Structures are given as structure tokens and as C-alpha cells.
Image: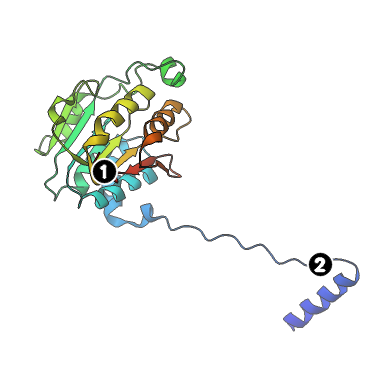
Amino acid sequence: MGDLFKKIIKKILSLGGYEIKPKAKKPPSPIHLWDNDRDFNIIYDNISKFTIASKQRCYVIYQFLKQCSSVSGEIAEIGVFKGGTAYLINKVLIDTNKTIYLFDTFSGSPKADHEKDPFYYENEGMFSDTSLDSINKMFSNQKNVIITQGEFPKTSNIIQEKYFSFVHIDVDIYKSIMECCLFFYNRMNVGGILLFDDYGDLSCPGAKEAVDEFFSDKLENPIYLPTGQSFIIKVNKK
């Protein structure tokens, strides 16, 4: 009766010049793996108070770390702030022999260019509500974590001879991001990942400009993610 009734109604409407259109199907919703991954959520629950990175961004880091765990080379994070993502990095790699190098001024963002980074130029010293002491306490029992205070790359002497499998760059402004690219690119092993946190952040136009400019003549092409992050996978030795 249901189908017959629908046919009758459809016929009546068609005589009047009307048409019943089927409801548009909604596209399938993606799986929210960041909510369903038990191991990740245990870590995230411990770091959520110590990072301003979204859960999705942290999950991207988590996945890349798992990928890079089998790539030779050390780990670095430039821009530690309160240590949330650094804690995530250490937890994921706890069973590896990789050394994790953490760099930050621990006194806020350095001076920015007024044209390339207008927001940070007007808000100099952002992210100063942290301290070297608090990060040292967070990793007090982790001998594989090396923490260095100061403006990178002035503080890079301890890693001049190191090579890397994963580097998380979260430094917001053009000059700092460009200097990180210049320093780390030739120190990345093949298969290693450079992850840029601020690439798609509207308050950080200098971040995208620096990454795009640096890789304009490289084999690697920055891949943009819906989280606002961007990354490259090193494909050659030089």
C-alpha cells in the first residue's frame, strides 16, 4: 500500500506539473580517529592543559611520529611553549633510542616583521607564560630529552652534526620559520618529515610565505592539511 500510494501521489502531482525529487544524500562522515584511538587519548588527556594545539593537530603529530619511528635520525621541536606536544613526542617514541631536542626562548616570541607578521609585530612577546624550569620538571626523568633555551638557530650548536627523522616547527613568524628550513632541510634523512604547525593560520601569514618560498625550488612540495598544518617528506639526501 505504501508504494502504491506514493505512485498515485506522484502521478497526481505530475499532472499538475510538479515533481517529487528524492532527498539529496549526505556525504559520509569521516571517522574521527582522534576520538577513537585509545592510546592517543590516554596521552592527550595528559597534555591538553599544556598545549594550545587542537586535538586533531596533536593526532597528526602522533601519526607522523609513528611513521618516523622507523626512519633513522633524531627528533626536534622548535617552539615548545608549555611542553604539551613535546610530551606527546616523548611518549610516542619512549621505546626508541631517539634523542629529542627541544628549543624555545621560554620568554615569548622574538621580534617579528611588521609586514610579514603584522599580528606578532603588534603583540611582541606572545607565549611568554611558560618557563624553562617548568619544562625541565616535566622531563626531569627523561635522559633522552635535551632542552635548550634561546632563540633558534643561535642555540643550534649542539645539533650541528645531527641528522633528523622528524622536526616539529611551531614558531609562528616568517624569519624563525625560514631559519628552521635553512637549518634542518639538509639535515633531514630520506623519509623524514618536517611539520609546520602555523602554515594555514590566518594570524601567521609569514609562516606560509616562508615555507612556500623555501620549497619553491626543491623536489618536495608542502602538503596542506585541513588542520592548518603543512608538511614535507624528504625525498633526497641534499
Identify the coloring: rainbow
User: Looking at the picture, how far across and down is residue 180, in whole percent?
Assistant: 29, 29
Residue at position x 36%, y 34% from top?
A: 52
User: Looking at the picture, how far across and down is residue 195, in whole percent?
Assistant: 33, 39
Does 108 appear above or below 222?
above
Number of numbered discs overlaid on the protein picture: 2
Q: Is residue 128 left or right of residue 149?
A: right
Give the foreground label among 1 and 2: 2
Closer to us: 146 or 113: 113
Check disc 2 and report the residue beneath it: 19
- Res 223 → quadrant: top left
Q: Is residue 159 left or right of residue 33?
A: left
Does 44 appear above or below 216?
below
Residue at position x 26%, y 54% from top?
A: 39
Rendered image: mark on residue 73? none
Check disc 1 and report the residue beneath it: 46
Three-letter code for the amino acid on which mark 2 is drawn: Glu
In the rendered structure, which disc, 1 or 2, sits on the residue that comes first in sequence? 2
Closer to us: 206 or 183: 183
Kind of element beneath mark 1: helix
The N terminus sits in image quarter? bottom right
Does 149 appear above or below 73?
above
- Crowd band around label 2 with a 10 angstrom C-alpha radius: few (<14), some (14–19), many (20+): few
Q: CA distance from mark 1 to mark 2?
A: 56 Å
Residue at position x 20%, y 46% from top?
A: 91
Kind of element beneath mark 2: loop
